[in-house]
Image (cartoon, grey):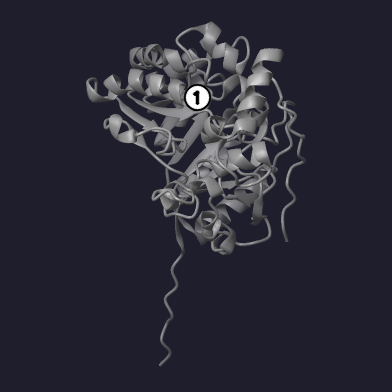
Amino acid sequence: MATAIATTRPKRYALAVELTGYCNQKCGYCYNDWRDDKAESSALPGPELVRILDGALRDVEFDHVTLTGGEPFARPDVWDVLDVVKGHGLRAIIISNGGLIKAATAERLAPYRPHFVQVTLNGPSAALHEEHVGKGHYEATLSGIRALSAAGVNVAGCIVVTRKNAAHVGETLELFASLGVRSVALSRYSPAGYAAQQIAELLPSRSDLLTALSQAHPFAADQGMSLQVTMPVPPCVVDTSDFPAIAFSSCPIGTEMQEFALGTRGELRNCTLHTESLGDAATTSMAELVEVPVHAGYRDTTPAFCAPCPMKAQCIGGCGAAAVSVHGARELDPFVGQHVDDALEARLVAARENQGSFVPLGRLKRPRPEVRP
């Protein structure tokens, strides 16, 4: 009598699906190096995207799916994607700027029961928020948050901490609290992808981040707000034990907490900030792609600066995507490098002294990476 051979799907933490390269905002900190400012942004056709995502969720057991972009709600068939996620018994996290969300959108979204919709505010005023994202978006974002909350959709906040707004994090958290938002990601700016062009203007210093964290900590410790620093903060820069009520994280690539990114052409990448493709999900099973050795060996590379550090295996030098965008290789995260790399420091100082806002630092424009066969 033949014995059945049990097969199990590989388990992975999360899959981020970039629905479109288009966004109605023009954020200086956007990592999306393949962003497309045309409303008819090139992206996978709806049926092809649904086919790839359905296959991915059949092949791999993901804890959840994150829908991102660009702006997810700029894509009219976002509902078809949500149907696929729901059909596999999963709930989505949605990363949105909130500006396209009206009452009808929020009411239609509510039955899908997303874990939350994360919406970013970068300051307590229109002037400061719009200095980061472009004119005319502050009130639309506030309106989107209110519409989601009114429909019973859980809203999480995000503050991209930069040189410009680090001293206003406390006021911004007050604004989120007034909107009923109790969970906020403190995503310190990382110059990966397109955002590398804004490094001189936006990269916070160690002192900037300490200011932001000092303002934020009482909201978590005394007011019960859930605060997470979602970008790597190397321990050589900040002693996270000084802020025990705030959760910190490090780069999850190559760990059980990795979130793979499915790009707008069907390419799979190590995360949303990285540009190198692991392969084409349109022609290769997701189970095969998540087993490739590229991500498994990612943590084997650490910058020379980190060699004597006992935490290097956990930290791996900070954000590798930012290092590649700024230096062209897996060197030290510029957030750390600005304080120990004399050449980078001089480059930043010169740009800040001699030029105006949103200054490219001479980074060559890279074409979108080719999908490896």
Quadrant position of the N terminus in the picture: bottom left
Q: How many marks?
A: 1
Residue under numbered circle 1 = 205
Q: Position of residue 68 (x, y in %)?
A: 56, 36
Answer with the quarter of the image where residue 230 lies.
top left
Which amino acid lies under the numbered mark 1 shown in the image of this protein? Ser
Residue 149: give x, y in percent of width and height. Answer: 38, 21
Q: Is residue 151 left or right of residue 94?
A: left
Residue nearest the viewer, comparing 226 with 46: 226
Residue 231 relative to residue 227: left or right: right
For mark 1, give the secondary structure: loop
Whether residue 246 can be seen here: yes
Which quadrant: the C terminus? bottom right
Q: Is residue 113 left or right of residue 372?
A: left
> Which residue is pictured at 51% across the width and 43% down the height?
83
Please state the horizontal and vertical placement of residue 105, each as a whole percent of the image. 51, 24
